[in-house]
Amino acid sequence: MKTSINSRAQENRPMAQPSRIYQRFMTVVEAYGNQTAISVDGLDLDYNELSNRVASCTDTLQTYGVGEGDVVALLLPNGIDFVVVTLATMAIDAVLLPLNPRFKPEELHQYLQMNPPKAVFCPVESRPVIEDMPLQAAVFEKVPDLSQEQSSSNLQVSHHQADKPAIYMFSSGSTGKSKRITRTQHQVLSEYYALERTISLKPTDCILCTIPMYHAHGFGNALMAALMTGARLVILTQEFSPRATVRSMEDSGVSIYPAVPFMFKMIIDTRFKSSPNLDKLRLLVSAGAKLPSEVAESFLQKFGKPICQLYGSTETGAVCINLRHPIEKSASVGQPLEGMEISILDESGQQLACGQEGEIWITSPAMTHQYDDLPEVTKECFIGDRFFAGDLGYLDDAGDLFVTGRKKLMINVAGYKVDPLEIEQVLKAHPAIEDAVVVGVTDPQYGELIKAVVVRVAGEACDEQDLIAYTASQLTEYKVPKVIEFRNEIPYSPLGKVLRKYL
């Protein structure tokens, strides 16, 4: 049986949709202007009010000379300003650079030097760090206040082709250096349209966001899914709280909740005084890491709602979702979204039979086709119209995809893909460390935790807390090792390859 599966039938599609994000947004505004667009911390904005804020922000960007192809760095946490800057950037064909606002100064410097911005939106505490960098950029701590006179109809938007760059994101690589990915407006919207048709997004939906919107999962499956549909986006801005999340589900009538496995696990482990009323919740989507079967089963038993696994990557956006058998096949990530294709190939590029494990290759109109300025890595991962994400898996007789592991050395910490070589480079720079290897260890809550095996320089002294503090000063929190093991030597093969199975 052929093990390359196309999405469900393409007949009876609606008319062609806009291929530029701002144009799509304005069609939503025209249709649902008085409907609530965003709810954040007790503040509701309808689509008309949101479009006015976008127009005001766009006017400010253009005043500072930001235009087509210029980079707008976004270091803000989830909130209204994040959404406004995103849509304003797309309106003028600038390029959005969403970054983790918790990045350390060294990390921010790396990303901003690699992608010099024309404008930066950052928290107040990050402003001194940004202004110390040799950047020619306007720096904002928040989006300029809304002018009541400003109307989105005054906005002079670009009408260039939709294959212009829309967003820069980064994927961990096998070289210790993040790989930059450029996705165009057309590619971003292609992901949205596929998701819209596959999960039947409707303007009556209410989507709850507790995942970072600078991450592909939050950006595509929460922000875009809601605001390109005319649905309501509810954003919780504080640290993740299971009680606050479930309370928001009840109070806001949430119908779709995208999250990561550890969030579902924390909700399961929380005791509630009374059983929550989740009747309006029609879809729970888990992505970013493998969903443990015991989490899926426990959630169903406690709340009566199945969790559907979604599979994708930064390079492709969402690719597959398990809508048909979320319980019977809880280990499956389901079948491709409309218009996407999955193939299972062996190392010679030959297609494998059902049930045979091989490399997962993706074909999608939503995916990028290269890593910027990395031609050799691009050749390894992009062949023809296919992308190899580094995962292994198989297709069963029904065409459902099962992801069985990684071919590349990635550590998955609560949905964040971490390159061990990046951490190893930091550790090896410590004056007391001679050698270091970083691996992932299984954790029931976060999927994996980071473990560092290190060899001290003879005569030098350092302990576990010294190294944790050292890495924490240079890397964002989720990249910091939680376990440090000291050894006399690292096990290597005769060819010099680290024998990670002994670590």
Image: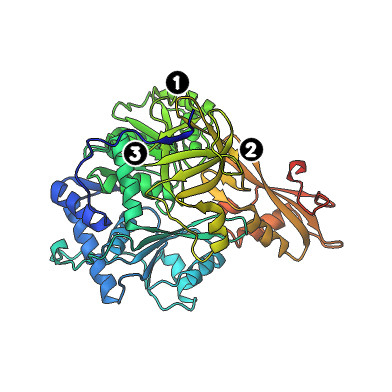
Q: Secondary structure at mark 2?
A: strand
Which residue is painted at 76% across and 52% down in the image?
497
Residue 354 lies, in percent from the top left, at: 53, 28
Disc on res. 301:
1
Above or below, comparing residue 49 to residue 449 in the picture: below
Q: Nearer the viewer, residue 361 or 404?
A: 361
Q: Are marks 2 and 3 in contact (CB under 8 Å)?
A: no
Whether residue 236 is visible, yes or no, is no
> In the image, which disc is placed on residue 442?
2
- Amino acid type, mark 2: Thr
Q: Say which quarter of the image contains residue 15.
A: top left
**Front residue of this view, candidates 369 and 80:** 369
Kindly report the distance in space between the C-alpha atoms of the residues bearing marks 1 and 2. Answer: 24 Å
Q: What is the distance, in whole Å, between disc 1 and disc 3 at their CAs?
A: 31 Å
Q: Residue 471 location in percent, x, y?
A: 64, 58
Quarter where residue 151 is shown: bottom left
Disc 1 versus disc 3: nearer the observer: 3
Q: Secondary structure at mark 1?
A: helix
* Crowding near the residue tagged with mark 3, few <14, some 14–19, many ≥20 C-alpha atoms within 10 Å: many
Q: Amino acid at mark 3?
A: Glu
Residue type highlighted by circle 1:
Gln
Front position among marks 2 and 3 = 3
Q: Position of residue 498 (x, y in %)?
A: 76, 50
Secondary structure found at label 3: loop
* Residue nearer the viewer, 16 or 462: 16
Closer to the chain start, of discs 2 and 3, is: 3
Task: Check disc 3 and report the residue beneath it.
Answer: 338
Instruction: Look at 55% across and 34% down and name the residue there.
Output: 352
Left or right, 48 with respect to 453, comes to left
Q: Are marks 1 and 3 in contact (CB under 8 Å)?
A: no
Q: Is residue 418 or residue 342 the one in the foreground?
A: 342
- Measured as percent of width and height from the top left, residue 50 is found at 22, 55
